[in-house]
Amino acid sequence: MKLTSDVLQLDLQLVETRVKRFIKDYVKKCGTNGVVLGVSGGVDSSTTAAIASLALGGHSVLGIAMPEEETYNATDIQHAKLLAKKFGFNLEIVDASSILKAFFKSLPSYDVADKVSRGNLKARTRMICLYYYANHFNKLVCGSSDKSETMMGYFTKWGDVAADISPLMDLYKTQVRQLALHIGVPEELATKPSTPALWPGHLAEEELGIKYETLDLVLFGLEHFMTTEDIAKQLNLPVKLVDNLKKRWLATEHKRRLPLTAKLGYRTVGLDFRLPYT
Amino acid sequence: MLKEINVALAQISCKIGDKEHNLDVMKRNIKQAKNQGANLIVFPELALTGYVCRDTLYELAEPVPEGESIRRLAEIAKKEAIHVVFGALERSEKAHATLYNTAVLLGPNGFIGKYQKMHLPTHSVFEEKRYFRLGYQTPVFETEIGKLGLIICYDVFFPEITRLLRLKGSQLIVCISASPGVRRTFFETLTAARAIENTAFLVYVNLVGVENGLQFWGGSRIVAPNGKITSQAKYDEEDLMIGKIDYADLKQTETFVPALRDLRPELFTLLKEKAENL
């Protein structure tokens, strides 16, 4: 298999149809009246909000922008508003600053210097808000995670990844960008650099240490059972870098599953209880 | 035996585990097909229960033909004086946890016979060997609508079984299926190949709808012995398509490409030897 950007090209019309059908079908089966999702102004959440609106109609989609003081970015809010207007979904803005301050103040062991734990608290706070809206308005929480970040474990456990459905989780980041442009997400949103917004100036590619165009090809190779040597050779990368990406992928499996338990019973949740979704 | 028959491709979507609902859908389709002059109606693989039943398979399975759902469908077939092929989850009468993925053939006089799937996919998203026992029989059914051979989904990847059915005299191969969208190209190619290489008609009926994130692509069809698709149902949507089979077409095609005449039986022995030592 040749690892070139061609392997990441999609039949965009088909993908759009399938993702829309997936969302519509599951919302109907669950008997809910739509979805609620966090809208950050970034490409993943913009694409998810847009395609959910195309699938369900904007009236069934509630976008929640949840800025907070430390990472506040007026352009992101403008982008969220622009998107809501274009795709006709409702947008509510929740200022998470006071909730976070209350959290920080209430934790006896709170350490302001620990930016990762502090950042994860932000992602989980956003999750709590979304589930409040979901419960209150009988909606599903629609996640925006993409395949690149999910495989890398580049998310907050039980935070931004927590959702009832994640329609784009089988698309790599560069594929989400393709889909975004295809369905009419404005180019300035579709192409802007990704940020988890856990601390000021937080950029995904800087933290991951690799461009998404390259990362996606590495992950595509791993998905297709290629060896790290072969991937590194084809992409002209150090084997050590590809090995480290593979290690990171494998080491973060715990973030993608229900908690591991000791097998004691006849059938066990997360191990051999194999039941279908609704 | 009829020289020409009308075949209804009943491309339905199933509710997982809801046999009552699925039976109603099947009953409605049978009546509609009969009204449109069908002699045979074909439903997808595991149409009675849905495909992704996982551990609930054990409580849903029924003996064939003694099970209640099978008997009810046999009554409908009798009443409507029509032949019916559908997928059922079969439980052995001798061993409770021994299940089969079965295709059932009913006719105007009730139950005619069954075929138990021989090739059980257990890779990628498929886990059939975890639940099902392999079938060992390749029956051909002599009926007033022709000599029928039955296969199920993944069986179509193995030319040996269709070849055997053809050599036993089957001129109409019925393949029931639950194939997700990502495999469409394989099935579109292989259904045509099986018809051409055996100079037989091939009726392919696939599921539609979404189960556990899998989207079944439909595209059910009648393939003539020359590989031409003479009737095709919609992609991805429920449909009931009626098509015609004229057995007189076999003679023309067989004369043009006498694939059966040119078979080399000595190769079968070699195939067996090599396959045992893969």
Image: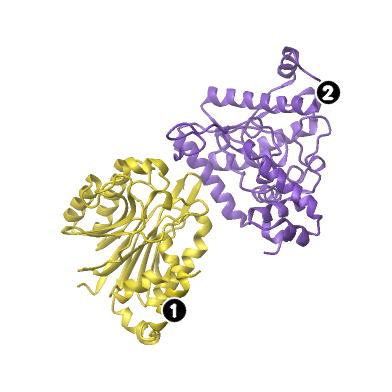
Chain colours: A purple, B yellow
Amino acid tagged 1: Leu
Q: Secondary structure at mark 1?
A: helix
Give how far across and how far down residue A106 sits, in percent.
Answer: 72, 12
Q: Is residue A4 left or right of residue B76?
A: right
Above or below, B176 against B56 in this view is below
Near-viewer residue (A264 or A100): A264
Q: Label 1 belongs to which residue?
A: B270
Q: On the same chain: label 2 and label 1? A: no
Q: Is residue A164 left or right of residue A205?
A: left
Near-viewer residue (B234 or B252): B252
Residue drawn at (52%, 64%) of the image: B185
Viewer-nearest of discs 2 and 1? 1
Q: Which mark is residue A113?
A: 2
Residue drawn at (77%, 37%) of the image: A195
Residue A196 sits in quarter: top right
Give how far across and how far down residue A3 sits, in percent.
Answer: 71, 61
Is residue B226 visible in the rendered image? The answer is: no
Q: Is residue A103 left or right of residue A134?
A: right
Amino acid tagged 2: Ala
Q: CA distance from mark 2 to mark 1?
A: 71 Å
Is residue A67 visible in the rendered image? The answer is: yes
* Letter of the chain that mark 1 sits on in the rendering: B
Q: Secondary structure at mark 2?
A: loop
* Letter of the chain that mark 2 sits on in the rendering: A
